[in-house]
Image (tube, rainbow, N blue to C red):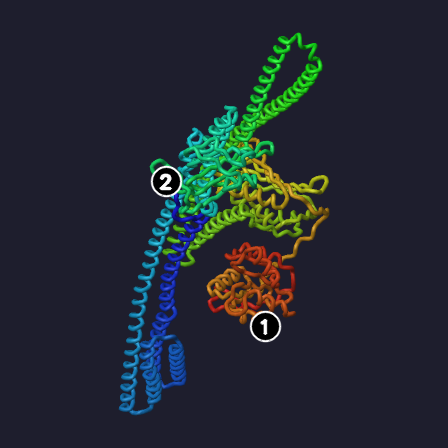
């Protein structure tokens, strides 16, 4: 199962998710760029082209009105007509001034520069025409002709200007249509590319996992049938690479191969030990015994040469008594060479990595080769050095083989001890028989010399004394034989103990095989649950993507602010929140499994947290057409815990009850302190679909939803209850599930340790209940602007600064109620430094500082607190989280909010005054 890319399963998931995210980000950037282009074109049409066209039309009308007023004055020179003419001139002059103030491109500016002097000249000519009412007809006609000529020239320029703006408007409309078409094509292409990339990543992931898993399953099946070949094929000589591999399947394969290899080696060793033990008791002849033991040693170690030397201390020589793969060698001096070193030091002597140019050779019959390793093992029994075993091999000898050689030497020592004892017994018996024969001969001689017995009493007495001494010596020898027999019995007992140990080792092997089968079953179960989870995860991620895609399609075609656009935005917001919760659950499970999650402990009122969770769940309960009954005692129950995590636990339990209770059902939440006031129990019960008894023991396991998916279509990923159990245990508590079966509801009991309980009514926490003066400091202009827009929709007064210095200056000049400050600001001053400087200003003591940042680890939260921030919010910021933070702001005297109504009357804005 060679893997060209050494990556763990988690790393592959991250890489696939990252690739898909980059593709989506690139597509989003393209769509955003095309949309910006469309917005710019539309803004140019609205803010530049249309005002210029309107201004040209108004100016044309004013010029005509001035001409009419001048002719009316000429025909009826009265004060009223003069005043009407002057009003028309003032209106035309004002229109011309407004016209000049509008933004223009170079071509429009050039035409306006041509139009303005003509219009001003026409106004002068019209005034002169009206003032010639008392003049001659010739002067009136001449002045009228001049005014008419100037008017026609001015109107011609106005018409040219209007035509230019109409052309610009048509070009902008064409460019806008092209931009919108580009947005649509980019969106469709991005969707297809994202879908193909997702399918490719999924196929590669499944292929990289399925191939090694199939190999493992085959090896496990063969092991169950007693076959070792497929499991041994998983073994690798590079153990360090296998242990340091990041791929969990590579590590598992190497572990299974190493276990199979170790079991095979252990089985071979046990068989070899059994053969050696059997050989050591098969013969009482030294040479035959040594030959049998040496044969077993050479065969198991796969050595090329073996010799057994017997120690002859009297001759100070080593006498060969057995050899394998070698002609009979000669005797060696006792203190010479490797065998002599083993004799002197009474320990095993091992020489590895022998140079190839050594004069010593191993004869194969057709060729010779220098050995790579030689080992000399002393044979010691009862602290007596009896022999030396020499083993030579063409490959290095490892520690396991040396241990086997030494164990074989001990077996050979016991056998040689028995053989020597047997030889000594035989020698003693021969000596006894010889003595007996001598005594018999002496008796016969005594009988033959009966006549001489009495004559030789003294000599016979002496002989009798000698015989008595010999009898005593025989008695002593007999006692020695009995002692040797006791030693033989002790050796036999040792052999029986060794056999018992072999039996115990066989039992251990059977137990280890049972454990391997159990691990195989666990791996199969983990693989099944993994496959179920991947399918469920794909389903849960695909569900929100479909409505998001449809909503984006609607937003691309619906008019901004229309009912369809608003509904599409609501759908995107809900589905994005759902995706965020799925990712947060996965991240929490990962942090808990890796031991990286931390609990920010503090003294919190459990009843306050319960009330907050009930309020947060109220809309979901009403939407599901359920009823929620809350039964909590009066007073205060203080626990040492993390407020956010406790709220997450209760929210998951309430959400679980909502999810699995049909319309019209009832949910009950109760809080009860135990009689000894050491713990408190929070119970969340429902009358929903219930839980079958066989599912209760594994209900809190991760991805357990895979087994429950058939019961409820909206079961989620099966992480909620696992998160609840892990977070409760981190708080030193327990959570238990109860149910009478399917269709009979369920009950979850949360038990937490208590610090103190007080009775009576607890004063509610004061919260901010009016519009706040908020300063947003963020170098991301879009992020700061959108956040300010959202807050203004909640009637707050918001100002945005894009640098640390501007934010400090604005906050110092007009202290706000709340400062929402980013941490990663450009320049030499980051968000932490901004907080420290704000805290140094006594005018800002009542200002609530909130860190808004993408750095959300416990160390980042601690750094923000140390810098002076009152609260820390991780991006992306939600309106619900801001409401929670604002609710925690102590009630204080609010600074006066000044609202300035805009001309349109459709919106109001505020600023710090």
User: Which badge, 1 or 2, comes first in the chain's sequence?
Assistant: 2
Q: Residue at x 62, y 65 (%)?
A: 847
Camera-nearest residue between 61 and 572:
572
Residue 643 in percent (x, y) is at 61, 50
Residue 269 in percent (x, y) is at 49, 33
Tag nearer the camera, 1 or 2: 2
Tag 1's secondary structure? helix
Q: Which residue is mark 1?
A: 813
Tag 2's secondary structure? strand
Is any part of residue 729 visible from this angle? yes
Residue 707 lies left or right of residue 62; in this view the side is right
Q: Quadrant where the N terminus lies?
A: top left
Residue 740 in percent (x, y) is at 57, 31
Check the image and report above or below for 439 versus 839: above
Q: Quadrant where the C terminus lies?
A: bottom right
Q: Residue at x 30, y 64 (%)?
A: 174
Residue 532 lies left or right of residue 839; in this view the side is left
Is any part of residue 71 visible from this angle? no
Residue 566 lies left or right of residue 384; in this view the side is left
Residue 223 in percent (x, y) is at 44, 32
Q: Which residue is mark 2?
A: 368
Camera-nearest residue between 903 and 230:
230
Q: Residue at x 54, y 56 (%)?
A: 856
Other-residue count near label 2 (Cα within 10 Å), few / some / many at <14 / 14–19 / ≥20: few
Residue 518 lies left or right of residue 66; in this view the side is right
């Amino acid at each position: 199962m060679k893997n060209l890319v050494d990556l763990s399963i988690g790393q592959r998931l991250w890489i696939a998710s990252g690739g898909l995210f980059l593709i989506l980000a690139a597509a989003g950037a393209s769509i955003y760029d095309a949309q910006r282009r469309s917005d710019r074109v539309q803004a140019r049409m609205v803010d530049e082209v249309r005002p210029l066209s309107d201004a040209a039309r108004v100016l044309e009308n004013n010029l005509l009105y001035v001409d009419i007023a001048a002719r009316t004055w000429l025909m009826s020179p009265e004060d009223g007509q003069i005043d009407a003419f002057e009003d028309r001139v003032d209106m035309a002059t004002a229109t011309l001034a407004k016209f000049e103030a509008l933004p223009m491109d170079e071509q429009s500016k050039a035409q306006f520069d041509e139009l303005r002097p003509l219009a001003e000249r026409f106004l002068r000519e019209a005034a002169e025409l009206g003032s010639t009412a008392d003049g001659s007809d010739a002067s009136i006609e001449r002045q009228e002709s001049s005014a008419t000529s100037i008017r026609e020239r001015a109107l011609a320029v106005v018409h040219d200007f209007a035509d230019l703006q109409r052309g610009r408007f048509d070009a902008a409309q064409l460019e806008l249509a092209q931009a919108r078409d580009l947005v649509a094509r980019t969106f469709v292409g991005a969707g297809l590319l994202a879908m193909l990339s997702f399918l490719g990543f999924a196929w590669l992931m499944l292929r990289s996992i399925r191939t090694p898993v199939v190999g493992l399953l085959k090896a496990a099946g063969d092991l169950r049938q007693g076959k070792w070949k497929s499991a041994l094929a998983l073994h690798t000589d590079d153990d360090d690479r296998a242990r340091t591999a990041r791929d969990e399947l590579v590590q598992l394969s190497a572990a299974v191969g190493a276990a199979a290899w170790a079991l095979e080696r252990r089985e071979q060793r046990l068989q070899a030990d059994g053969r050696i033990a059997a050989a050591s008791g098969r013969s009482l002849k030294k040479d035959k015994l040594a030959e049998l033991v040496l044969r077993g040693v050479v065969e198991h170690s796969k050595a090329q040469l073996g010799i057994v030397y017997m120690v002859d201390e009297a001759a100070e020589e080593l006498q060969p008594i057995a050899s394998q793969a070698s002609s009979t060698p000669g005797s060696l001096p006792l203190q010479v060479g490797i065998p002599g070193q083993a004799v002197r030091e009474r320990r095993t002597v091992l020489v590895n990595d022998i140079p190839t140019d050594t004069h010593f050779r191993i004869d194969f019959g057709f060729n010779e080769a220098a050995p790579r390793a030689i080992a000399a093992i002393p044979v010691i029994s009862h602290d007596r050095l009896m022999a030396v075993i020499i083993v030579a091999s063409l490959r290095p000898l490892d520690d396991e083989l040396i241990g086997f050689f030494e164990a074989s030497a001990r077996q050979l020592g016991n056998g040689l001890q028995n053989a020597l004892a047997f030889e000594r017994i035989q020698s003693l018996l021969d000596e006894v028989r010889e003595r007996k024969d001598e005594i018999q001969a002496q008796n016969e001689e005594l009988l033959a010399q009966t006549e001489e017995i009495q004559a030789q009493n003294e000599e016979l007495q002496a002989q009798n004394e000698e015989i008595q001494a010999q009898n005593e010596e025989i008695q002593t020898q007999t006692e020695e034989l009995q002692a040797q027999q006791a030693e033989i019995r002790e050796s036999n007992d040792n052999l029986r103990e060794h056999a018992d140990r072999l039996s115990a080792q066989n039992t251990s092997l059977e137990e280890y095989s049972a454990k391997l089968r159990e691990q195989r079953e666990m791996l199969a179960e983990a693989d099944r649950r993994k496959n179920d989870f991947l399918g469920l995860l794909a389903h849960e991620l695909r569900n929100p993507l479909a409505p998001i895609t449809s909503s984006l399609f609607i937003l691309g075609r619906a008019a901004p602010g229309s009912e369809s656009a608003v509904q599409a935005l609501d759908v995107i917001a809900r589905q994005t929140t759902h995706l965020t919760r799925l990712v947060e659950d996965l991240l929490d499970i990962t942090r808990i499994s890796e031991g990286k999650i931390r609990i920010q402990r503090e003294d919190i009122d459990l009843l306050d947290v319960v009330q907050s969770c009930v309020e947060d769940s109220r809309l979901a309960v009403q939407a599901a057409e359920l009823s929620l009954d809350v039964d909590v005692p009066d007073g205060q129950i203080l626990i040492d815990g993390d407020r956010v995590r406790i709220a997450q636990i209760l929210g998951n339990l309430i959400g679980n009850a909502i999810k699995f209770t049909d319309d019209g059902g009832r949910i009950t939440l109760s809080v009860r302190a135990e009689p000894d006031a050491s713990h408190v129990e929070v119970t969340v019960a429902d009358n929903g679909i219930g839980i079958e008894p066989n599912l209760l023991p594994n209900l809190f396991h991760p991805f357990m939803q895979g087994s429950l998916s058939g019961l409820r279509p909206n079961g989620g990923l099966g992480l909620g209850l696992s998160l609840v159990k892990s977070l409760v245990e981190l708080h030193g508590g327990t959570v238990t599930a109860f149910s009478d079966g399917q269709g009979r509801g369920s009950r979850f009991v949360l038990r937490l340790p208590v610090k103190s309980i007080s009775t009576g009514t607890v004063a509610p926490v004061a919260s901010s209940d009016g519009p706040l003066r908020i300063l947003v400091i963020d170098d991301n202009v879009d992020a700061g602007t959108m956040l300010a827009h959202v807050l203004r929709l909640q009637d707050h007064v918001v100002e945005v600064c894009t640098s640390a210095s501007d934010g400090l200056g604005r906050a110092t000049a007009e202290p706000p109620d709340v400062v929402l400050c980013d941490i990663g600001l450009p320049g030499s001053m980051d968000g932490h430094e901004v907080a420290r400087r704000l805290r140094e200003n006594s005018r800002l003591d009542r200002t609530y500082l909130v860190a808004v940042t993408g750095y959300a680890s416990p160390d980042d939260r601690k750094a923000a607190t140390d810098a002076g921030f009152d609260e820390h919010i991780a991006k992306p910021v939600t309106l619900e989280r801001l409401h929670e933070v604002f609710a925690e702001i102590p009630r204080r005297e609010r600074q006066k909010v000044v609202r300035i109504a805009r001309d349109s009357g459709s919106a109001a804005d505020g600023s710090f005054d």
